[in-house]
């Protein structure tokens, strides 16, 4: 991570973040740090047994019972780390040895692990709360009371890692009366257009967050309020940065992408033969007058509060 006497963010970087809604910091973390995260995630994936722990695939359930189980599993990940699999048909699964994993992959590869690694895991916790991260949030982004609310390890396995449609993080994680969420996204592997890197729409954070995912009245599932036409396109990212204004955020291992909570971003399917693992932490600024909205899907019990830095 950066040396303690290095400027956290320059005036030019802050201006670019304010203008575009994102900022790429190459080599923020070391290769060794990324490989330690990778090894820790691989151990979780190897130990995961859906028959014992349950499981959840991100798809529209065919039955009300399946939907309720999916909702309960997802909502429970606010306070317990859980594994989520890719939404794949049998014919989409790679054969043994296909995908660079030596044929050791389980029948349904993991999409991600979430959402408490930053507070509960012996490898991810110290990394997420490291002094360099604290300095970036407090001194660089000038947050007053940063709190890490969720974390995700995202796999993007070769040839099966699914696309993520356009979205704004503050649609899913919101504070009142203003949205203060910021995403920190580390490239655990080199991220390129070919293996499903992030894409962002510069300046889209200036349009606000017109759509929010909230708990339903029974607080046992989620629903959406509002409409966000700009995030309705679920097609794959454009082939060039000139198409629709989208920009690919290609970054080498150890690079950090900072995302404003309202900026539109997306990623394509990993159609390559190499993985594109990533680790993300979402942070909100609970400064005086700002609160964690009770309508958020992510609600922790009183004995497991959000941690500061």
Image (cartoon, rainbow, N blue to C red):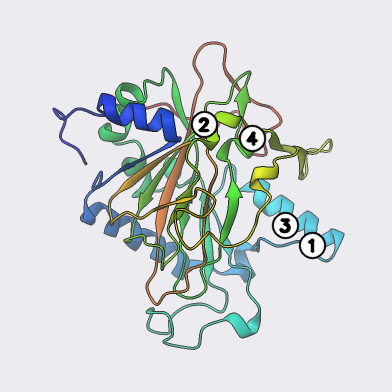
Q: The residue tagged with tag 4: helix, strand or loop? A: loop
- Dot label at residue 299: 4
What x and y, as percent, mark residue 160? 52, 73
Q: Residues within 10 Å of mark 2 (few under 14, many from 20)?
A: many
- The quadrant in which residue 31 appears is bottom left
- State which tag comes first along the sequence, 2 or 1: 1
CB within 8 Å, label 2 to label 1: no
CA distance for labels 3 and 1: 6 Å
CA distance for labels 4 and 1: 22 Å
Residue at position x 82%, y 66% from top? Answer: 62
- The quadrant in which residue 275 appears is bottom left
CA distance for labels 3 and 4: 17 Å
Q: Which residue is mark 2?
A: 181
Q: Which residue is mark 3?
A: 70
Mark nearest the camera among 2 and 1 is 2
Tell me: residue 86, above or below residue 244. below
Q: Residues within 10 Å of mark 4 (few under 14, many from 20)?
A: many
Q: Locate the C terminus and report the quarter of the image it occupies.
A: top left
The residue lying toward the viewer, choosing from 247 and 176, is: 247
- State which tag comes first along the sequence, 4 or 1: 1
CA distance for labels 2 and 1: 31 Å
Instruction: Specify the farthest residue to the right.
Output: 64
Q: Which residue is mark 1?
A: 66
């Amino acid at each position: 991570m950066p040396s303690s006497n290095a400027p956290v963010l320059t005036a030019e970087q802050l201006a670019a973040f304010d203008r575009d809604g994102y900022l790429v910091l190459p080599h923020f973390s070391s290769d060794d740090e990324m490989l330690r995260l990778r090894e820790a995630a691989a151990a979780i994936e190897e130990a995961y047994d859906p028959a014992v722990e349950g499981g959840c695939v991100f798809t529209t359930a065919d039955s009300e019972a399946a939907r309720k189980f999916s909702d309960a599993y997802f909502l429970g990940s606010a306070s317990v780390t859980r594994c989520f699999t890719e939404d794949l048909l049998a014919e989409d699964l790679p054969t043994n040895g296909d995908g660079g994993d030596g044929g050791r992959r389980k029948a349904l590869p993991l999409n991600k692990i979430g959402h408490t690694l930053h507070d509960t895991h012996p490898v991810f916790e110290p990394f997420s709360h490291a002094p360099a991260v604290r300095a970036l949030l407090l001194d660089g982004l000038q947050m007053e009371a940063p709190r890490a609310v969720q974390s995700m390890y995202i796999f993007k396995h070769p040839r099966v890692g699914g696309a993520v449609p356009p979205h704004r993080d503050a649609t899913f994680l919101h504070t009142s009366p203003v949205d203060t969420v910021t995403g920190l996204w580390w490239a655990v592997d080199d991220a390129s257009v070919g293996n499903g890197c992030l894409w962002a729409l510069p300046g889209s954070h200036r349009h606000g967050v017109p759509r929010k995912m909230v708990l339903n009245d029974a607080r046992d599932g989620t629903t959406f309020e509002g409409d966000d036409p700009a995030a309705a396109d679920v097609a794959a990212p454009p082939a060039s940065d000139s198409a629709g204004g989208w920009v690919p955020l290609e970054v080498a291992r150890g690079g950090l992408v900072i995302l404003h909570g309202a900026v539109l971003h997306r990623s394509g399917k990993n159609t390559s033969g190499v993985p594109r693992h990533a680790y993300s932490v979402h942070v909100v600024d609970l400064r005086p007058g700002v609160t964690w909205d009770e309508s958020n899907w992510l609600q922790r019990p009183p004995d497991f509060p959000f941690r500061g830095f």
